[in-house]
Image (spheres, grey):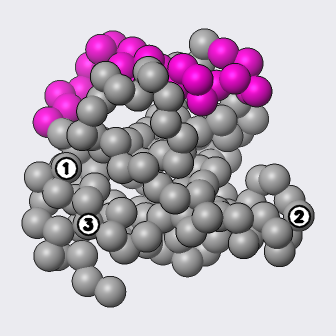
């Protein structure tokens, strides 16, 4: 199975949407649509690695994503473990992803991490990380890079 580890803040939202809404927990429908295309083209399952996993269940996150246009919301399969407070979670995200990979009973053939944050624990994942610019959120080029990491022809991702 192919896996996308998904951060939400800075990936499915951006600085502009925060400025517009003044609300911390918001996502951009256009960015969700882009993620949906990526999931459809790769057939990947989505594992939530975002701090949002600390305040919402998998089912609640599926609902939020579906209500913002993600037709592949059923591909959201779970969350990484959490070993930190909500304010410090990004510092350990790489380790939490590694732990999920080590304990899953699924055969993971390829994975990619979509995140706007980089810390030393992410180093262990090397070229598996697509560092998304928090000012823009997820882009077409980020999706093409993710497809390549997952072993899918990035040419399948069309605008």
Residue at 54% across, 20% down:
92
**Residue stretch rendered in magenta on the structure:** 84-109
Check whether the beta carbons of the residues at disc 3 and disc 2 lie within 8 A of each other: no
Badge 3 crowding class, 10 Å Cα cut-off, few under 14, some 14 to 19, many 20 or more, is some
Against 125, is 143 above or below? Answer: below
Q: Which residue is under mark 2?
A: 22
Query: Whole-percent x and y of residue 12?
Result: 57, 61
Q: Is residue 42 left or right of residue 100?
A: left
N-terminal of the pair, mark 3 or mark 2, is 2
The residue tagged 3 is 144
Displayed quadrant of residue 64: bottom right
The one nearer the camera, 98 or 79, is 98
Quarter of image, res 128: top left
Examine the rendering and report whether any part of residue 105 can be seen: yes
Judge whether residue 33 is colored magenta. Answer: no
Q: Residue at x 88, y 64 (%)?
A: 22
Residue 102 among those drawn in magenta: yes
- Mark 2: few/some/many CA within 10 Å (<14, 14-19, 20+): few
Q: Residue furthest bottom?
A: 159
Looking at the picture, tell me which residue is in the foreground, 154 or 40.
154
Q: Is residue 65 left or right of residue 158?
A: right
Comparing 98 with 118, the one in front is 118
User: SS class of the residue under badge 1?
Assistant: helix
Q: Which residue is mark 1?
A: 149
């Amino acid at each position: 199975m192919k896996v996308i580890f998904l951060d939400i803040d800075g990936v499915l939202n951006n600085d502009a949407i925060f400025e517009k809404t003044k609300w911390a927990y918001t996502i951009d429908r256009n960015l969700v649509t882009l993620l949906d295309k990526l999931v459809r083209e790769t057939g990947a399952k989505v594992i939530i690695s975002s701090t949002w996993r600390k305040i919402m269940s998998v089912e609640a996150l599926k609902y939020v994503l579906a209500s913002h246009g993600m037709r592949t919301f059923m591909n959201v399969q779970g969350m990484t473990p959490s070993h930190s407070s909500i304010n410090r979670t990004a510092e350990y995200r790489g380790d939490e992803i590694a732990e999920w990979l080590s304990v899953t009973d699924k055969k993971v053939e390829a994975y990619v991490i979509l995140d706007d944050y980089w810390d030393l624990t992410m180093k262990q994942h090397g070229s598996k990380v697509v560092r998304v610019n928090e000012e823009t959120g997820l882009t077409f080029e980020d999706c093409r890079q993710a497809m390549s990491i997952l072993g899918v022809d990035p040419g399948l991702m069309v605008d």
